[in-house]
Amino acid sequence: MASNYVDSSKDVRLSKRDLNILAWRSLFLQASFNYERMQAAGWLYSIIPGLRKIHRNKDDLSNSMKDHMEFFNTHPFLVTFIMGIILAMEQNKEDRDAIRGIKVATMGPLGGIGDALFWFTLLPITAGIGASLAMDGNIAGPFIFLILFNIVHFGIRFGLMRYGYNTGVRAIQKLKESTKLVSRAASIIGLSVVGGLIATYINFKTTAVVKTGEAKVALQTDLLDKIMPALLPLAYTFLMYYLLKKGRSPLTLIGI
């Protein structure tokens, strides 16, 4: 592991004040949202004070920042849990591939959990309470909604920051001898998440029909989907990956 770092010392520990500052910065997670790397710039902005404190060597800090500018997308209210775990791994100077794998493996599931917890549960309940008061002529309705929603929101945001960090530190100590296995498992989960994202987000279909005599065969539903569901989105993803490797810009791919 030490080969990944110029300075492999692990004597730095983030304080509660540091964690609170990072949690506040996480509010800007989507301030630089884009379709190439999604929340990556906001993610790096959120954790960079912690990285600067942990990595006192400029090369180590530079390598870490480059890694954290890779594609990232999760629920903005639960991101602090991932921040805590990743900063604990950075603090322990874990293998960079392991850090990347854990980040990819956790961002997808937390995105789904956050949607269900906040947008489909908390928001309808608190908005319903506020709206019912407002419809009865009570001016406090909107304020009740905002107060109730944000008590839960900020409680979870700051609570998960500390919980993720403390959990990460303990987990790293227990799994120190199994880092390679954890890294491999995280990579497998990460690839599974990417596969799920391809099938979910890439809506690539064809209505082409092949005629053979009097018979008609729908190219996608009768042939391609029989071979493997979402085969076209997968093929399209590999094409985009190939073009990226050939030096095509992301803007060109978006245009295509």
Image (cartoon, grey):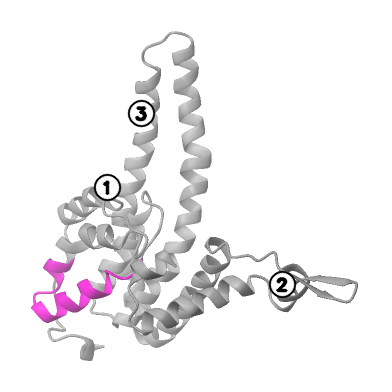
- Residue to which mark 2 is pinned: 225
Q: Amino acid at mark 3?
A: Leu
Q: Amino acid at mark 1?
A: Leu
- Residue to which mark 3 is pinned: 146
Pointer 2 or 3: first along the chain: 3
Using a 10 Å C-alpha cutoff, classify the residue at mark 1 as few (fewer than 14 neighbours), some (14 to 19) or many (20 or more). some
- The picture quadrant where one finds residue 205 is bottom right
* Residue 10 visible: no
- Residue to which mark 1 is pinned: 27
* Prevailing secondary structure of the magenta residues: helix
Pointer 1 or 3: first along the chain: 1
Q: Position of residue 64 (x, y in %)?
A: 21, 75
Residue 76 relative to residue 187: left or right = left
Direction right: furthest residue:
214
Disc 1 to disc 3, C-alpha distance: 16 Å
Pointer 1 or 2: first along the chain: 1
Secondary element under disc 2, as helix, strand or loop, is helix
Q: Position of residue 48 (x, y in %)?
A: 18, 63
**Magenta-highlighted residues:** 51-71
Q: Position of residue 145 (x, y in %)?
A: 40, 26
Disc 2 to disc 3, C-alpha distance: 46 Å
Is 201 contained in the magenta span? no
* Residue 217 visible: yes
Q: Quadrant of the C terminus?
A: bottom left
Q: Are dots 1 and 2 in contact, CB under 8 Å?
A: no
